[in-house]
């Protein structure tokens, strides 16, 4: 049974645990996890050999740290998972600062212990409530983070404004004995950053001109975007000097890593028994990879992993819509990626050249490159010479949206259905059409054939050879 008073706590709870700082607590629990072989930061993909070891080192060193990386690199998720390194719950006094019964900080806690002694009430704070997060914005004030004088409190107590019990504490003091995460710290005004490191390092701060000493027990973790260091703001040197470790995050390094993240996060569990062929999922994931390399896309802004997640969700939705409309099985097809363009156009920042071409044109080009990339490995063993020759002879192919009509049109292209059935193990008409479309899109991405708004045809070079270059 858990202690409800300070006296019971002293008799039943290891006092050594109350002597630890929150960083020591995290360090001890991390050591136990490492010894047991437990997976650290579950759900975080692609960082096992890069970010996670650096995080482990920072925790073992009891460092405050900053995660530095572009958008969509799981920085906030990592911060929120730090609570897994804390005890399930800790005893505290029922005060705003969740004071340690053996090391009270607030005037309220000191008064409570003085009046009640061992009869002082004890509450138990679960680990999830020991994490406080603030998204830094330029209008964030010192009062938001640290606190301000509350005239109403002062009036009720009949004391002056300099009384510590007249202070309404901000987010950082309320994170005492826990973790305080600050996202996009570079956006904080310099004077706020100064107040922040002052209370962390020296333990004192001035609130409305009154000096307040608070030796807070807080583990602080920051995130920032490298672009912000020069674009919107920067971290002041004294604060940067007090951050123990700077850890760089990154986008997935391989298509498989990216796909694992996307499939973990995307909502594709639809009621109609959705089937997403692996090659369609790979092509969807490849869009982000080619976008990160495309010169028309702003690299300093980055291409978030959320693009891949949203894209796959829209692909699933269009497959679902088509199945409902035509009474088909719910199978995702390459055509669904073109219906999912809003997931791309809204998540890429374009350079001048891209702005001139327009977001939709750039997005369509990225799709074709992505199909070419995904088709590369899949093309081994597929015989497509007859398919390419069919279009080289000047033939066009326009595929309707419904699978039955698309299958009839594909029968006109020699070798296409044979290659599709070799690629796709499912024998349903919908799956065969999906595989056939992927082959056509892959050939277009590899510039073996051309893809227009509605039809597949010979590449421009072949057309010139056939009809001449003209005048």
Image (tube, rainbow, N blue to C red):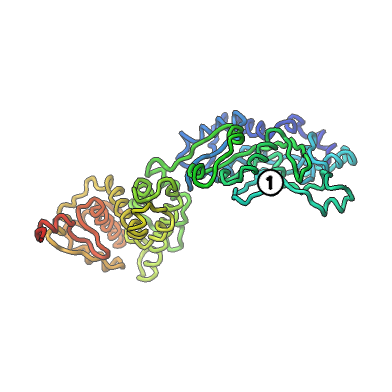
- The residue nearer to you, when weighing 41 against 209, is 209
Secondary structure beneath label 1:
helix
| Quarter-of-image position of residue 454 | bottom left
Left or right placement of residue 184 versus residue 317 in this view: right
Image position, residue 248 (x, y; %): 49, 37
Q: Quadrant for the N terminus, please.
A: top right
User: Which residue sits at x=77%, y=44%?
Assistant: 123
Left or right placement of residue 65 versus residue 6 in this view: left
- The residue nearer to you, when weighing 270 against 321, is 321
| Quarter-of-image position of residue 33 | top right
User: Which residue sits at x=30%, y=65%?
Assistant: 403
Image position, residue 243 (x, y; %): 59, 34
Image position, residue 198 (x, y; %): 68, 36
Left or right placement of residue 127 versus residue 72 in this view: right
| Quarter-of-image position of residue 343 | bottom left
| Tally of numbered tags | 1
Q: Which residue is mark 1?
A: 142
Left or right placement of residue 63 versus residue 105 in this view: left
- The residue nearer to you, when weighing 155 against 20, is 155
Q: Is residue 340 visible?
A: yes
Q: Residues within 10 Å of mark 1 (few under 14, many from 20)?
A: many
Q: Is residue 333 visible?
A: no
User: Which residue sits at x=10%, y=61%?
Assistant: 471
- The residue nearer to you, when weighing 207 against 17, is 207
Image position, residue 6 (x, y; %): 83, 38
């Amino acid at each position: 049974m858990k202690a409800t008073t300070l006296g019971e706590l002293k008799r039943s709870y290891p006092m050594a645990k109350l002597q630890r700082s929150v960083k020591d607590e995290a360090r001890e629990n991390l050591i136990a996890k490492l010894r047991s072989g437990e997976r650290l930061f579950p759900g975080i993909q692609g960082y096992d050999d890069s970010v996670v070891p650096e995080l482990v080192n920072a925790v073992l060193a009891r460092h405050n740290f900053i995660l530095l990386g572009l958008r969509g690199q799981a920085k906030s998720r990592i911060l929120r998972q730090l609570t897994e390194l804390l005890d399930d719950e800790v005893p505290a006094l029922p005060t705003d600062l969740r004071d340690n019964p053996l090391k009270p900080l607030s005037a309220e806690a000191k008064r409570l212990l003085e009046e009640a002694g061992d009869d002082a009430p004890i509450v138990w704070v679960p680990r999830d409530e020991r994490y406080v997060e603030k998204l830094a914005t330029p209008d964030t004030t010192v009062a938001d983070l640290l606190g301000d004088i509350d005239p109403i409190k002062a009036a009720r107590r009949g004391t002056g404004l300099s009384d510590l019990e007249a202070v309404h504490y901000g987010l950082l003091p309320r994170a005492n004995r826990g973790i305080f995460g600050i996202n996009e710290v570079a956006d904080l005004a310099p004077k706020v950053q100064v107040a922040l490191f002052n209370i962390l390092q020296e333990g004192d701060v001035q609130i409305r001109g009154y000096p307040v000493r608070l030796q807070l027990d807080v583990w602080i973790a920051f995130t920032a975007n490298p672009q912000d260091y020069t674009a919107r703001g920067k971290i002041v040197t004294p604060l940067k000097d007090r951050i123990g470790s700077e850890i760089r995050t990154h986008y997935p390094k391989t298509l498989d890593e990216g796909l694992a993240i996307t499939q973990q996060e995307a909502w594709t569990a639809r009621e109609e028994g959705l089937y997403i062929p692996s090659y369609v999922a790979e092509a969807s994931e490849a869009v982000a990879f080619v976008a990160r390399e495309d010169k028309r896309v702003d690299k300093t802004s980055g291409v978030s992993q959320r693009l891949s997640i949203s894209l796959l969700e829209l692909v699933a939705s269009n497959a679902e819509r088509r199945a409902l409309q035509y009474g088909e099985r719910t199978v995702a097809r390459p055509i669904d990626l073109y219906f999912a363009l809003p997931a791309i156009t809204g998540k890429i920042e374009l350079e001048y050249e891209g702005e001139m071409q327009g977001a939709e044109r750039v997005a369509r080009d990225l799709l074709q490159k992505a199909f070419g990339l995904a088709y590369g490995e899949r093309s081994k063993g597929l015989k497509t010479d007859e398919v390419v020759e069919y279009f080289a002879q000047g033939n066009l192919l326009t595929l309707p949206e419904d699978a039955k009509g698309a299958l009839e049109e594909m029968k006109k292209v020699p070798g296409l259905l044979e290659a599709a059935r070799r690629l796709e193990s499912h024998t349903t008409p919908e799956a065969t059409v999906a595989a056939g479309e992927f082959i056509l899109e892959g050939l277009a991405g590899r510039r073996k054939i051309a893809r227009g708004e509605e039809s597949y045809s010979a590449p421009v070079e072949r057309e010139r050879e056939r009809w001449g270059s003209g005048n």
